[in-house]
Amino acid sequence: MRFRTSALALLIAVGLTTPLGAQSITDRYRADADRIIDAALKDSTAWNRLAEMTERFGNRLSGTPALEQTIDWVIARMKEDGLQNVRGEPAMVPVWVRGEESAQMVRPRVQNLPMLGLGGSIATPPGGITADVLVVGSFSDLTAKAAQASGKIVLYDVPFTNYGETVQYRARGAVAAAKVGAVGALVRSVTPYSQRTPHTGGMSYDSTVRRIPAAAITVEDAEMIHRLVDRGERVRVTLEMSAKTLPDAPSRNVMGELVGSEKPDEIVVFGGHIDSWDVGRGAMDDGGGVVVAWEAVRLLKRLGLKPKRTIRVVGWTNEENGGRGGQAYRDAHRAEVDKHVLAIESDGGVFKPQGFSFTGSDAAVDMLKQIALLLDRIDAGAMVKGGGGADIGPIMALGVPGLGLNVDGTKYFWYHHTEADTIDKLDPNEMARCVAAMAVMAYVAADMPETLPRASAETR
């Protein structure tokens, strides 16, 4: 009796949720997972396909021909790969056009300032805005200096801590500056490392506050202006922007499937966003997220691994400046949202994978940890709480469990939303490991007899 009690305690201690004597999820799928990993690590198709896509079509801002041409190309290639139910599902997307733009310091000396207008910004008046610069290091600093702000261009020189904390100055800086009478807003690019490369990204307006133009300048120039002001210099800048917002335009979420053998109406959905900002080529953010999921499905098909449930790969549209793709997917599939057993998103770059982060029930995370153990051989077996993504967020809000692929993000924000987001920043072997991680996780979740338990509405 003591021996049996100890054995049961040991099983519970190692996290197995199966009855005594039964196989764990890890043991049950070890051979299939090893086949998937072995095949993925021998194949550079993901890197090569991403290189072809990004270099053929370039960046893919919502509302541009380049995005729609890319979607057409993906549909054609998915069909060639033999994926099932390949299609584009409609979504209306915002259309913001950057136009011509420039920034120049004109006092105490003349120097051009590399810049990128923030997505959604209005234009300057014809001829631009020339004004003195008020440097602030936080929103509270702006409040303290509010009496000095009227008629100025506010520069937020805020060093990068983490994206969530620092991006608020890009997102809300124009509104806060306008409230104290500023005529324009500049933000230090949201990055921990710079080679005088500006970073764009979305910003927002408040309908109750006058709209002013907003742009990002480089870390180096933000720090230089700050030092000049601290020395008592009067810094004056001319900002010219011709940005405009056009009426919404039609786009599509692009998708294909590996239809399940026993429960085809139950779905594991995964992917990334097919759009990008209008700089660089959108390789890291987030063409790679789409391609690794696409390649994962192609790999499973090539290996003859057909899960019980359907695996659906999606390239969501308009994540960068609207999130309309994720919303359109939710609306189009609302009737089947209860049949979505898991949603997985890759939107952190396709660098060396480390594991996944999960939002859902405790019982589900225990099962997913067993799947993650299959990825220990490629050092991608971590499973932590608190995951998801912008595109799967709308269906997660309806109760679908969500996973985010976690990677080594050391260099992600070096290139994020810049002209430097190109294929050469990515390593073929690291991408192959991402394919392996996505394929194993999606396949086992789609094939195992157990369905991931959902969190109750009260605990979501």
Image: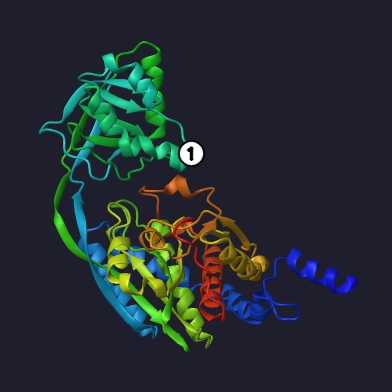
Taking depth in this image into account, of 375 and 330 the one nearest to the observer is 330
Q: Where is residue 449 in the image (x, y as percent from the top left)?
A: 56, 81
Q: Which residue lies at the image location 62% right of the left edge and 65% below the top edge?
A: 366
Q: Is residue 234 visible?
A: yes
Give left or right: position of 441 versus 317.
right
In this rendering, the answer to whether 170 lies above or below 153 is below
- Please, what is the three-letter code of the amino acid marked with disc 1? Pro
Vertical placement of 181 versus 413: above or below? Answer: above
10 Å crowding of disc 1: few (<14), some (14-19), many (20+):
some
Q: What residue is shown at x 36% (from left), y 57% (from top)?
A: 282
| Vertical arrangement, residue 319 with respect to residue 236, above or below | below
Q: Quadrant of residue 273?
A: bottom left
Q: From the image, which quarter does the N terminus lie in?
A: bottom right
Horizontal and vertical percent position of residue 236: 25, 20
Residue drawn at the location 58% of the way across and 61% of the way down? 362
**Mark 1 sits on what residue?**
192
Residue at 42% of width from left, 30% of height from top?
158
Q: Residue furthest top?
A: 232
Residue 108 at what x, y percent from top left?
29, 17
Report x, y in % for residue 2: 89, 70
Position above or below: 137 against 363: above
